[in-house]
Amino acid sequence: MWAKSVAVAALAGAMAWASPGQAEPPAPYDITPELIDAAKKEGSVVFYTATDVTVAEKLAATFEQKYPGIKVQVERAGSERVFQRIGQEYSTGVYNADVIETSDAVHFLLFKKEGWLTPAVPKVVAESWPAEERDPDGFFAAYRAHLSVIAYRKDQVKPEDAPKSFADLLDPKWKGKLVKGHPGYSGTIMTATHAMSKALGWEYFEKLGKQDVMQVQSSTEPPKKLAQGERSVEVDGNEYNCFRLQEEGIPIEIVYAAEGTPLVIGNAAILKNPPHPNAAKLFYAYLFSLEAQQLNHDFGGLRSFHPELKEKAGRTPLKDIKLMLPDAAGLESEIETIKSRYEEYFGT
Amino acid sequence: MSNVASIAQAPRQTRRFDLSGPVFLSLGVLLSVLVILPLFWLLVYSFTTKAGSFTLDNFVTLVTDRAMRRSFGLAIGMALGVGALACLVATPMAWLVARTDLPLRRFVRALVTASFVTPPFLGAIAWEILAAPNSGIFNNLYRWLFGLDSSQYLLDIYTFAGLIFAIACYTFPFVFTLVANALDRVPSDLEDASSILGGKWLTTLRRVTFPLVLPAMLAGSLVAILQALTMFGSPAILALPAGFHVVTTKIWSLFQYPPKLELAAAASIPLLLLTILLLRGQKWILGRKGYTVLGGKSGSPMITRLGRWKWLAVSFVLSILCLTVIFPYAALLKTALTHTVDAPLSWDSFTLRHFHFVFFEFSATRLAMFNTLILGLLTATGVTAIALVVSYLVTRRSVLGAPALGVLATAPIAIPGIVLGVGLFLSYANPTFRLYGTLWILLIAFLTIEMPAGYQQLSSAFKGIHPELEEAGRILGASRLKALWQITAPLLRTSVIATWCFVFIGTIRELSATILLTTANTKLVSVIIYDLNESGDLGAISVLGILLLLVSFTVVFLASRMPIGSTRFQPRG
């Protein structure tokens, strides 16, 4: 008994020593007038993001209004492109970006491992974010969450004919009517594909691959293909884009699949060598503020971990939706398999 | 006359300062660095493992991997399809425009220039708007006209054939321009001789005119094939939704996490070999025939009267132009001005919000426009200058080893832009150079990518001018450079301006290498269009596309009006 507990203690000690986060997470910080002044002197902040470009630009605009004199440069691309770009930049010593955000949680595990992040914990994150939605060492935190949903055009599909589950999508009547994003390109789809392959098995994708699915890249694109009227049903795609298109009056209906809807966490972090360190801190703290989170939610249709956030009327609250939870650590080792399987079934 | 006089005045001095030796050396070094460095790294990578030891595994994977083989097969099929289609369409068009009394010839030339100026990826997006099976304007029209239900469609651009068509629409001008220019250059003397000797109209066409423009046809088709083979944007936009890869998109997918740079490098080697093979093939077909046209231009070209065929010809030409320019542009304009793509054209759906978004909300626009313009101007000027000197040295064989320069200047054509992007990234984004994240690495990329086009244009122009004229100048005592400047250069004005425009347009529409080399501060319009396409913002794309086209047209227009001599860019027709 005694020997065993010693062994456990020793092991725990060794692990704590070996992990890069041996140091305590930094003390939480708040937005102070000194921070704002220092940020204003730097004059700008560079934000690498995978959020939909109109949402990201809107967030930037409200930040600029709130802190005049600090310009936000928004660099939007798909999660994997952002990842590829920052990988190229940091491995060659180019330090352009201040704050980074993608919808692929695996990225942040890798960034942390590579030592590309600066630990920073805004006060609100320390106080009210669920422990599992922030890095224990303070390197990153869940800036947003969203769902990858099935959706359809109400004017092309009658509600009684609409799919209720992923299994329904295998019906031959959907042949040539489906659109879906690509896991190699989109972090959201990668996370969702991983969760679905666990829940439904790869046979599901093998069958889906025979449905003549229109293959797009980013997870923002399937909803837009619905809006365009190019396909009637999306297999996956961002819930927030569907919300936004609904608000524009486009007849799209969201389906929360019977098997569960994949949840996707989007982390944010300050990079290791931000060209504008104070502006980066200010902007990073702003990202988690109620104002920004509410804007992301109301205008951007994103889900949030901020406890005071008011859910917008007409949207199904997160707690009422059956979810497929992400598993970033498990996904990391399976990316290769997912990509090659996917190519086998879908051709790209 | 005054030229001859001034040459005669200073014979000896200038001869001592014949600069071709040093010029040759420095160009050799420059081109070697531009071309050999990225190729060297590609080779190194293709033969190494991730750990850095020697291996052939990458090539084994190329051959054994089914998906990889398929992407090669499809890419080759696509490229040949594009080459054939482009040649088939462009040659009769060029002949009609250059050698017949077809009405509206100037207008036709202008519109072909327009389709040449159109970036292929923009054309592909426009064709998505027109011919996507469900939302495409043509398909909606078709269903509406015949009262069909929503499962029916006429065209599907997301197919192999659709892809070939969409690429050919924007590569046929390569064939057209070269053939039309060749037809302009072929002097009527030879054709007159044929007629005088009793050759019928068709015999003259077949036995004299056709052989004289055959090199241009082949060269043009070759350019079209190579363009298609190494193109990234259009396949990324049309082939991926259709569920297949071509080589370039496959290579691109190898950069996604976890990146397989070694395999990507290896995959580019067969492309390189294939291109060399094609170039050899061209040489072999042409054999040793000489196509020199003595003394620049002589006489005006022989014009064929179309007579009652006129309207058939007009409708042929117009329908091609509708497909390549008029319909796609209309689709972009409509998308830019309406809420959603499938919204009907009415006052209700009219909006300026895409313009507002691009100009006032989207923070990347201004920087990208500026970068694009600067790089376009620098690249066009740089490539034209270098290509001019190189093609002179090569065609006149004035220095021992000059043909090697020609090989170097042509070699980049064999490297897909995306692979060159990797090679350049490996070469210049390291502690020694630190060029990644600057416009320099993009400038180097563009100089390398555009060199073959510039060189091919100018060297074929040089081949059309017999060295006798220069030799006359040299005999009268002019140095090589002086002869070049005062005799050959004036004869080349049109070609030089055309090349400059060619390169400028090529630069601002480049996407495949650019996409790996841009960073936040070095964004280009082509890249933001591609980014926006990935997120499906067709309205914003249309606005940016229209903007890009307007800038391109302005530049081409200004360049064609440049007061250099009396000749203008494509003035005849």
Image (cartoon, coloured by chain):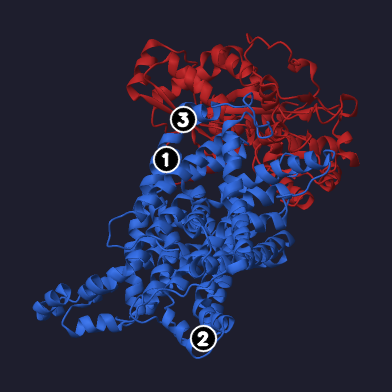
Quadrant of the rendered structure where residue B561 is? bottom left
Residue under pointer 1: B369
Label 1, residues with CA under 10 Å away: few <14, some 14-19, many ≥20 = some
Q: Where is residue A20 in the image (x, y as percent from the top left)?
A: 54, 33
Please state which amino acid type lies under the numbered disc 2. Gly
> What subunit carries mark 3?
B
Tag 2 and tag 3 share a subunit: yes
Q: Which of B439 and B118 is in front in this view?
A: B118
Label 2, residues with CA under 10 Å away: few <14, some 14-19, many ≥20 = few
> What subunit carries mark 1?
B
**Residue at figure coordinates x 53%, y 55% from the top left:** B418
Tag 3 and tag 1 share a subunit: yes
Q: Is residue B358 left or right of residue B398?
A: right
A281 lies above or below B204: above
Residue A125 is at least partly visible in this image: yes
Please state which amino acid type lies under the numbered disc 1. Met
Label at residue B287: 2
Q: Which of A239 and B80 is in front in this view?
A: B80
Q: Distance between the residues labelled 2 and 3?
A: 54 Å
Q: Colour of chain B?
A: blue
**What chain is the red one?**
A
Q: Position of residue A194 (x, y in %)?
A: 75, 38
Q: Which of B241 and A329 is in front in this view?
A: B241
Residue under pointer 3: B359
Mark closer to the chain start, 3 or 1: 3
